[in-house]
Amino acid sequence: MGRSPLPGSMSHTAALGKFPRIPFGPTRSRGLTEYIHYGYTVIDMLADTKALPPLSPAVVHILLALSAGERHGYAIMKEAAEQSEGRVRLGPGTLYRSIQNLLSAGWIEESGERADPSSGDERRRYYRLTGVGREVVMSEARRLSDLVRTARRRRLLGHQRPAEG
């Protein structure tokens, strides 16, 4: 059982060539190098969405917004605020940097056609989830669901009945 090459070594750098920039994690948009630096295992993350590290809140909210259909940037910002009851506010810098990373990763794509071309400004760019993006957001939703289930078992969420038995 061999260990991963050390960050910065020739073989380490060569191994990274096949991995795309990943839009999440400790530094969110700097790519897979940070994961290796922070101790994550090098794997083909696109082949196994269950192996992905947790996504940043901004990326989760963008993917969730797009899971309901195509949206332009401002609509994604509004949806994120609504679905979080105002606790998440995506600024334009965070939103568009995340969108660029998601486009590069192939998790979303720019929509050439809109569902209703008569609505909205033609200068707006609309985005939609790809198949891989849908798998990623579903995997993250399952991960979060498992986390909430654990918190409930440990009575960390309010208004719970006492354990039976």
Image (cartoon, rainbow, N blue to C red):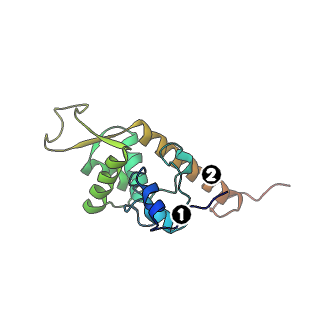
Q: Is residue 83 visible?
A: no
**Amino acid under disc 1:** Pro
* Quadrant in which the N terminus appears: bottom right
Residue 60: horizontal and vertical position, in percent?
Answer: 43, 53
* Number of numbered discs on residues: 2
- The residue sitting at 38% across, 44% down in the picture is 107
In the drawing, does residue 153 fall left or right of residue 98?
right
- Label whose residue precedes the other's in the sequence (2 or 1): 1
- The residue sitting at 49% across, 68% down in the picture is 37
Q: Nearer the viewer, residue 71 or 5?
A: 5
> How would you rate the neighbour count of disc 2 (Cα within 10 Å): few for under 14, some for 14-19, many for 20 or more?
few
Residue 124: horizontal and vertical position, in percent?
Answer: 18, 44
The residue that label 2 is drawn on is 146
Residue 70: horizontal and vertical position, in percent?
Answer: 31, 39
In the drawing, does residue 142 fall left or right of residue 78?
right
Q: Is residue 109 visible?
A: yes
> How would you rate the neighbour count of disc 1 (Cα within 10 Å): few for under 14, some for 14-19, many for 20 or more?
some
Spatial CA span between label 2 and label 1 = 32 Å
Q: From the viewer's perspective, is the residue at label 2 or at label 1 nearer?
A: 1
Task: Provide the secondary structure element on which disc 1 rests.
Answer: loop
The residue that label 1 is drawn on is 5
Q: Dividing the picture into quarters, in which one does residue 119 lie?
A: top left
Q: Mark 2–mark 1 contact, CB under 8 Å?
A: no
Q: Nearer the viewer, residue 133 or 63?
A: 133
**Amino acid under disc 2:** Asp
